[in-house]
Amino acid sequence: MRRILKNSSIKWRLTFIILMVSFISVLITTFAISIIGVFSLRSNLVKDLEITASIVGDRNTAALLFNDDKQAENNLNVFSVNPAVVQACLYSEKGELFARYLNKRYEYDAKCPTDHSAESVIEKERIKVMQPVVKMQDTIGYIYLESTQDQVDRYIERQITIAFLVACGALAVSWLMAINLQNAISQPILSLSEVARQVSRNRDYSIRAPVRGDPQKEYNNELVILTESFNAMLREIGARDQQLKQKNTELEKARDIAESANRSKSQFLANISHELRTPLNAIIGFSSILMNQLFGALGDSKYMEYSRDINESGVHLLDIINDILDLSKAEAGKLTLTYEEVHVGKSISKCVTILSERAQKGGVSISTHVPKMLPALVADRLRFIQVLLNIMSNSVKFTNEGGHVDVTVSTIETQGEVSHFVIVVRDTGIGMSQGDVEKAFQSFGQVDSGLNRKYEGTGLGLPLTKKLLELHHGTIEITSELGKGTCVTLVFPALPPAGLDYQLADI
Ligand SMILES: Nc1ncnc2c1ncn2[C@@H]1O[C@H](COP(=O)(O)OP(=O)(O)OP(=O)(O)O)[C@@H](O)[C@H]1O
Ligand SMILES: [Mg+2]
């Protein structure tokens, strides 16, 4: 019942509750009145029977005194007009049956009792009265009357009929009341819920719930307050929604402008880098001709020193320009990878060789741990080495004399196949704080801890490394502690994304 009520609408709940309350109250009232009625009816019946018994007893005193049983029977026959009387028994002084009236209908189930001392009793179906017949304070006999309770049964039947009719009337009245209440209570709530449904379906905050009643006059009516508040809430949401849409449009515009500015910047950097590389290559080429004295001795040793400086600076500038070009291309989405099989161990050895001179100068030792039976990694070989060089050169660069750099390679297997390569580069260098790690990933984001300013660099290595890893669908994670060291974890998928072709190059 409770579940049915829970699932039904407020309209049906209200109607059901009103109908049930009135129906049950009618039943309880009728039941109570009937019980009281039955009790008083029974006691009235007993009294009536007792009065009748004493009257009939008085009438029979002469018949008893003169032993005239015929007269007594005649007297008792008056009960034949009352079908409720089952029998009447008259006894002599000694208690012997003197005369009797028996209703024909109860011929077989009525007997005159022998005990004269019994008082009035109400049995299940009968009322029985026994009284002495007294003449001048002497008991000259006894009279016994037995009556049915038909009257009580008829009363109960009548009460049931009345109760049924009253209950029907009450239900009808309650139904009318419920309809009235629906208009007053459930209708505003239903219309509120309908409006709420429309608002959530159409996302239209201009809809308003109709206010039933005058808010000025009915300021105490909770339903009017509820509807007014609901409408105010809709107005507020509508206004905010409008503001939000406006803000979104502005933000989208700003984003488009920023993106286009970024694209222009990347394009500009790519162009300028390209333009710079041509004269730089000439500078590097000519300075190396001078350095190598291809067209004869330079003479003064200062010329030799300066031409080496020109060459080194040129190479360094070319490195920077190449990084800028790569980063700009990556940001403009124009950097493409050429996948081929890469020997991870050999690539790491190559990086160690490139960095060994620098590490030796700085007093930093490098160790590597590469498993022997490694499968090939499918990646862009040159970019893979570029990533390794960036990370390992950082470790060498930011580690002071006596420090150590360690490179460890491991694999992750999925369903028995190597799915990822994990390369961990750990150093015992100057380290960074957590905030600095985030800054280090931004272009030109060199961490200025006061210590590292003595290290050369442009702050392009890490952002470029991150972009290259993203292009490979890999990840880079840096954990670092100031003064203790840094640990960089690179994860490369063993294979390029499905559907991408790659060359099986000679590794
Ligand atoms: N292993 C490391 N230990 C301490 N600090 C580091 C380490 N790696 C990077 N950093 C910090 O992060 C900054 C950014 O590194 P990133 O490689 O991008 O630039 P860079 O090495 O300074 O210059 P570039 O790589 O362009 O020559 C560095 O300047 C340095 O402050
Ligand atoms: Mg670097």
Image (spheres, grey):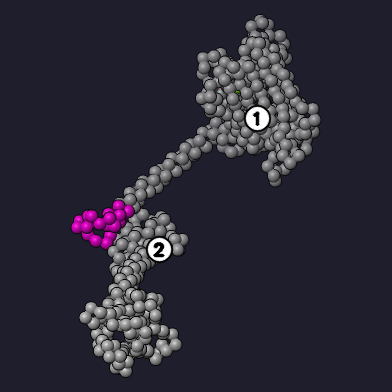
Q: Judge the density around disc 1: few (<14), some (14-19), many (≥20) Cα neighbours within 10 Å.
A: many
All told, the count of numbered labels is: 2
Q: In this rendering, which labeled residue sits more in front, label 1 or label 2?
A: 2
Amino acid type at mark 1 = Leu
Q: Are marks 1 and 2 in contact (CB under 8 Å)?
A: no
Q: Nearer the viewer, residue 176 or 69?
A: 69
Residue 389: x and y in percent read: 67, 24
Residue 367: x and y in percent read: 72, 19
Residue 411: x and y in percent read: 72, 32
Amino acid type at mark 2 = Ser
If you read the primary sequence from the N terminus, does the residue marked by circle 1 or circle 2 appear first?
2
Q: Would you say residue 179 is visible in this rendering?
A: no
Query: Looking at the image, which residue is at 71% across and 34% down?
Result: 412
Please say if 23 is above or below 96.
Answer: above
Kindly indicate the quadrant of the structure image that contains residue 21.
bottom left
Where is mark 2, residue-wise? Answer: 9
Q: Nearer the viewer, residue 71 or 381?
A: 71
Disc 2 is placed on an element classified as loop
Instruction: Assess whether residue 223 is covered by the magenta stretch.
Output: yes
Instruction: Determine the residue located farthest toward the top in the rendered image.
Output: 300
Query: Looking at the image, which residue is at 35% across and 82% down?
Result: 95
Q: Is mark 1 within 8 Å of ligand 1?
A: no
The reply, left or right, for residue 465 in relation to residue 166 is right
Q: Nearer the viewer, residue 375 or 269?
A: 375
- Give the alpha-carbon distance from disc 1 to disc 2, as whole Å: 60 Å
Q: Which residues are magenta?
A: 211-231
Query: Looking at the image, which residue is at 65% across and 30% down?
Result: 490
Residue 47: x and y in percent read: 27, 77
Instruction: Assess whether residue 412 is covered by the magenta stretch.
Output: no
